[in-house]
Image (tube, helix red, strand yellow):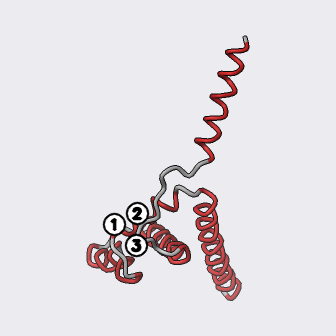
Amino acid sequence: MKIKSLLGILLTTLLLQYCSSTGSVEKPDNLIKESVMENIIFDATLMNTMYTYNPKNPDFEAVLGKPYLYIKYGIDSLQLVESESYYSKFPRTYFRMHNNVLERLTKIQDSINEVIDKEKASQ
């Protein structure tokens, strides 16, 4: 019985230590700053939302697709993937970034709804 309880304590300690450590998360050399990454997520979400409501226009896809983000923020695809992967290893930071994006999107939605309501009221 003592062996089982000792083994259980040992396994629990190892599990807690493993789960609480950040492991071998190395910061990429070209990590995108958190505030910039938040803006990239915001822009990508807006672009994705626009494509949901309208079919993709091939003439504008090259301009307003991923190349737009790379040019606007002066990044490349590898830098974006590495930064996204790095931030995803830190749930609190990642959640805060996405929560800030959600708040910004909600403000935009509220503004649009306000304009629509004014339009309806004036008609």
Is residue 79 shown left or right of residue 119?
left
Q: Which residue is mark 3?
A: 30
Sequence order check: which comes first, mark 3 or mark 1?
A: 3
- What's under tag 3, amino acid-wise? Asn
Q: Which residue is mark 1?
A: 78
Q: Which residue is mark 2?
A: 82
105 or 29: nearer the eye?
29
Q: CA distance from mark 3 to mark 1?
A: 9 Å
Residue depth check, mark 3 versus mark 2: number of the one nearer the observer: 3
Q: CA distance from mark 3 to mark 2?
A: 8 Å
- What's under tag 2, amino acid-wise? Glu
Near mark 1 (Cα within 10 A), the count class, few <14, some 14-19 or many ≥20, is few
Q: Secondary structure at mark 3?
A: loop
Q: CA distance from mark 2 to mark 1?
A: 6 Å
Q: Where residue 120 appears, x then y in whole percent?
A: 66, 82
Sequence order check: which comes first, mark 3 or mark 2?
A: 3
Residue depth check, mark 3 versus mark 1: number of the one nearer the observer: 3
9 or 65: nearer the eye?
9
- What's under tag 1, amino acid-wise? Leu
**Quadrant in which the C terminus is drawn:** bottom right
Is residue 92 shown left or right of residue 73?
right
Q: Is residue 85 above or below residue 116?
A: above
Residue lying at 73% horizontally and 14% vertically, measured from the top left = 2
Q: Secondary structure at mark 1?
A: helix
In which quarter of the view is residue 102 placed?
bottom right
* Proximity of marks 3 and 2: CB atoms separated by less than 8 Å: yes
**Quadrant in which the N terminus is drawn:** top right
